[in-house]
Each structure stands twice: as C-alpha cells, then as structure tokens.
C-alpha cells in the first residue's frame, strides 16, 4: 500500500517522490509505504486550500457543521476499523485506540454544535444611531502539524474547529502514523467534503513543515509535538508574524498526600504513567509523595505492576504496548541509565524487553525509580516512555513547589481527602490542567487543552478556546445616523 498526498480532493500520482516504510512497532511488520512529500507538494496543497477557502467561507456555518456531523457518524460506524489500524500503526493497546477514536467522534459532534453558535457579541456604541458588534472571521488557510502519539484525536482537535470556522487546511501528520491521516481522508471523501477543504502532505524532517510555515498563504500554524520542533515552528512563524499555536511537552506529576486514598492513587498512577506506554504529553512522569506514606505507596505500586501484561496491543488482554520505534527505546533507556548515575534507586523495571515474541517490537519494561532528587535530570526532563520517578516531600507547600519546579506546565494531579488542601493545590499548581483524586491523563474534548511555561505559548486546543486559534475577531460598526459622527470627538 502506497500513501500519497491528498490535494484538492485527489490522490497525488505515485512515483514522483521517495517513499519510506511505515512499520508496526509491535512486530516490525511493514504496513505501508508513505510518500516523502516535497516543498512543491506543499505549494500545490496550499494553492488548492486557498482556492477552496473562498467558497467554503461563504457556506453558512451550520451547513459547514453538517459535514462534521456526517464525519462523526462515519467515524462511529468505522470505529473498530480505525482503532485496529491505529493500534497497528502506533502501538497503543486496542482499548485505548478505541478511546482515542471516540475522542475524535466526540470532537466532530461537539464542533458541529459550534456551527450553530460561533458567537460574537453586540456592544453599545458610544455614539447615537450607531451599532457595534464583533464576529469571528475565518483566517483562511491553516497549517496543521500533528504528532504520532494521538494521530487521530489531535488531528480532530485541530481540523474540526478549523473547518467549522470557515478555514481550509493543509495537514502534515507525523511520518510514523500516516495511515490514520489516510483513513481520515477517506472519510472526508465519503461525506463529500468539498475538494480542497482538507489537504494532506507527508514528509519527514523539517523541510515540509518549514515550507508550510513559511508559505505566505498559510495564516495560522497549529502544532503539537516536541519542544525542540515547537521552538523551530515558533521562530519560523514569528519571523513571518504568524499566529502559531503550540502544544509541547510535559513533566506531569501526581501528588499523593498523607491523607490520600492510597489504593486509588496507585490505580491513577498506573494508568497515567504506563498507559500508552507513557507516550502521552499528559503522562505521569513524577510522583510527589508525602514521606509518611512513601513506603506504603512504593509497596502497593510494585504489587499492582505485577498485573501489567506487555505485548502486541491487538491482544485484548495486553495492558502495555510497544513504544513507537528504536530511537524512542534508546532514549528511554538512556534516561534510565542517567537516573542510575544520578543516584536514584531503581525499584522496578529498567530493561528493554526482548524475550519471545517481543524481540521484533520495541518494548520497554514499566519502570519505577524512588528517592529521586527533585532537581535531577530524571525528575526534570521529558522521557516519553513508561518511567516514573518518586520524589519525597514533607508538606503540601513543598509538593507544590516541586511540581512547579519543571520547565513544563501541562497537567498535574493531587490525591488528598482534605478539601482545604485540594482547593489550595488547584489554585497554586502551575499547569494548564489539574486533576483532583485522578491521574494526570484523561482530558475531555470540550475543555481547553494546553499548558503553561515550556508546554505552550498561551493558546489552547479543544473546547471553545480552539476557535480562538482559527478565527480573527472582526469589529463592525454600522452608523445609521446619516451624518458624520466622530468617535472620541462628538461626545454629546
Ligand atoms: C497527549 O497527552 O498527547 O488527556 C494527548 C489525555 C488524552 C489526550 C492526550 N485525552 O490523556
């Protein structure tokens, strides 16, 4: 199977470019060949999007929304198929893949509803016989750059608000997960989305992305991915004075206080640290634990980890799938080595798994370190794998300080039965998302998603906040006095 660009509603001819293999991280099987798009491909895609946008912006928003309803219904119908492809391509276990597809379906219906809102506001003018209001206007062509860890959900977080608001888009999915983009293109075709509204280019390295950002007709870039690439996107976009929305890394912590329900906390930590093999921006990578319950928590965590089965995510009984590729495996193991050198105590895991059927895939053993220094590299840097570090503290204030000591600010969580503590914590935790008595993962699509500090640049995916990325406010004044009225001057 050869995956080609989807431009102006047609599949670009094969054979004009280089291709690279898409591999199943569970067993190394080749799933498809994906085109390495060129800068010329980007120009063609942007031109198609620009042409289509003129008409698309004139389609009333509730009618644009109708396409999203159809997309949502079709995704629902294809849910199992999409989940199967997602597990094969990305590696996450099938139960989570179904959840991710559901997240996309939810986004379709939620954003379709926005088609009948897209509220602006009327405001009183300071002059008589003058009407003032402001409305959301589409920006035009938008560029979407999405990661491999949530290849379908994050794509819907960006593309659905973009199109309901009257934009067209050029989307560059991660090279590791182009099949989900292909599946989405099939859905766009099947519901009859006008040609050129959705365009897809592939590509590895930064060339294709840079061409998108630098293209004068691409007005907004929405990016989710690594901090390193995000910085490049911000710098390149900044030079062009473009609106750039960035969602980057996390170093998310669960705080467990001495009055917490420890069993509940263990469940939350397990799910947030090892779900998706730790490859969520929201993954729990630190546990900040009160000294009085540290030993109990360690014991219960180690005990609970015995139930985690590792393998191919298509097997319904498996809880932890592979990590995305060899490079990721090496990076994760590199951090485990760093942790040991830094003097952290390895409580569980710490090895690359190669026994039996696992030998052909990229599997890492769920890993727990304890007695980790809050300022060590292990506790400060994003690992993006199934590795969690326990850090001991003596008070709520210290826990919050440690939580806030990292350069990221995506998600945080606190387990405590004390209402005063949790209210103080939700106020003082410097992250875009805070969970009380739940792990650090599990964001819902109708709330803003994003973070503070090194995680983002003030924009949000999801929720109505996403519309702020893909629209400009337009202020409109209608003077019906029939005479020249001057604001600030004619004050009577
Ligand atoms: C990500 O962490 O990369 O909150 C996205 C969650 C999911 C989305 C995560 N709904 O865990």
Image: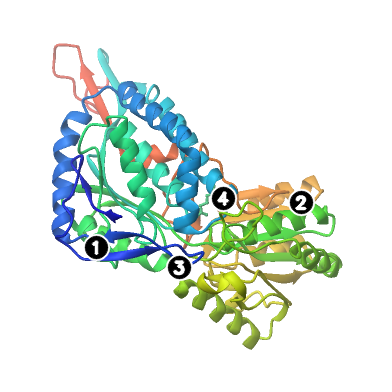
Check residue 396 in the rendering and tell me which mark sits there, or answer none. Answer: none
Q: Nearer the viewer, mark 2 or mark 1?
A: 1
Tell me if I can see residue 463 in this picture: no
Mark 4 Cβ inside 8 Å of ligand 1:
no
Residue 278 is drawn in which quadrant? bottom right
Mark 2 and 1 residues: CB-CB less than 8 Å, in contact? no
Q: Are there few (<14), some (14-19), or many (20+) residues within 10 Å of tag 2?
A: some
Give me the residue at 71% from left, 54% from top.
268
In the displayed structure image, the side of residue 198 where residue 274 appears, left or right = right
**Is residue 21 toward the left or the right of residue 74 in the image?**
left
Query: In which quadrant will I find the C terminus?
Result: top left
Query: Between disc 2 and disc 3, whose residue precedes?
Result: 3
Residue contact between numbered discs 4 and 1, judged by CB atoms under 8 Å: no
Q: Which mark is residue 421?
A: 2
Q: Distance between the residues labelled 3 and 1?
A: 20 Å
Q: Residue furthest front?
A: 356
Please report whichever mark, 2 or 1, sits nearer to the chain's N-terminal start: 1
Q: Which residue is drawn at 28% across and 54% down?
A: 3
Mark 1 sits on what residue?
A: 36
**Residue at the spot x=77%, y=64% of the render?**
301
Give the structural element (helix, strand or loop) at label 1: loop
> CB under 8 Å between callouts 2 and 4?
no
Q: Which of marks 4 and 1 is nearer the N terminus?
A: 1
Q: Which of marks 3 and 4 is nearer the N terminus?
A: 3
């Amino acid at each position: 199977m050869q995956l080609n660009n989807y431009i102006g509603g047609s599949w670009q001819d094969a054979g004009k470019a280089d291709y690279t293999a898409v591999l199943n991280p569970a067993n190394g099987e080749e799933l498809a060949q994906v085109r390495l798009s060129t800068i010329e491909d980007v120009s063609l895609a942007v031109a198609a999007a620009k042409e289509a946008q003129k008409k698309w912006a004139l389609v009333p928003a509730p009618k644009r929304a109708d396409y999203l309803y159809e997309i949502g219904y079709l995704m629902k119908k294809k849910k199992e198929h999409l989940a199967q492809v997602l597990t094969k391509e990305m590696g996450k276990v099938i139960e989570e893949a179904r959840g991710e597809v559901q997240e996309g379906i939810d986004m379709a219906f939620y954003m379709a509803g926005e088609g009948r809102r897209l509220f602006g506001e009327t405001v009183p003018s300071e002059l008589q016989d003058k009407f003032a209001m402001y409305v959301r206007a589409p920006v035009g062509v938008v560029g979407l750059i999405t990661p491999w860890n949530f290849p379908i959900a994050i794509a819907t977080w960006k593309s659905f608000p973009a199109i309901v608001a009257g934009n067209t888009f050029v989307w560059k999915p991660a090279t590791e997960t182009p099949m989900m983009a292909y599946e989405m293109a099939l859905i766009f075709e099947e519901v009859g989305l006008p040609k050129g509204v959705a365009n897809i280019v592939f590509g590895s390295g930064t060339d294709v992305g840079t061409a998108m950002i630098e293209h004068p007709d691409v007005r907004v870039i929405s990016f989710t991915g690594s901090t390193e690439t995000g910085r490049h996107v911000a710098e390149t976009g900044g030079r062009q004075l473009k609106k750039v929305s960035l969602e980057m890394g996390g170093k998310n912590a669960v705080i467990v206080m001495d009055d917490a329900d420890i069993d509940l906390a263990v469940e939350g930590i397990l799910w947030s640290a090892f779900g998706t093999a730790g490859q969520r921006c929201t993954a729990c990578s630190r546990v900040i634990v009160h000294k009085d319950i540290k030993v109990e928590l360690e014991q219960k965590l180690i005990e609970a980890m015995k139930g985690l089965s590792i393998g191919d995510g298509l097997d319904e009984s498996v809880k932890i799938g592979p990590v995305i590729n060899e490079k990721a495996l090496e990076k994760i193991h590199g951090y485990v080595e760093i942790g040991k050198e830094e003097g952290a105590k390895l409580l569980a895991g710490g090895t690359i798994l190669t026994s039996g059927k696992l030998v052909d895939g990229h599997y890492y053993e769920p890993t727990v370190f304890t007695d980790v220094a809050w300022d060590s590299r292990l506790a400060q840097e994003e690992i993006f794998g199934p590795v969690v570090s326990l850090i001991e503290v003596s008070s709520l204030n210290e826990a919050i300080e440690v939580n806030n000591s990292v350069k990221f600010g995506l998600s945080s969580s606190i387990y405590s039965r004390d209402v005063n503590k949790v209210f103080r914590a939700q106020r003082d935790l410097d992250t875009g998302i805070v969970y009380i008595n739940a792990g650090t993962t599990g964001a819902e699509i109708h709330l803003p998603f994003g973070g503070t500090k090194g995680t983002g640049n003030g924009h949000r995916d999801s929720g109505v906040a996403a519309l702020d990325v893909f629209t400009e406010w337009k202020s409109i004044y209608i003077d019906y006095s029939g005479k020249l009225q001057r604001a600030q001057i004619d004050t009577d």
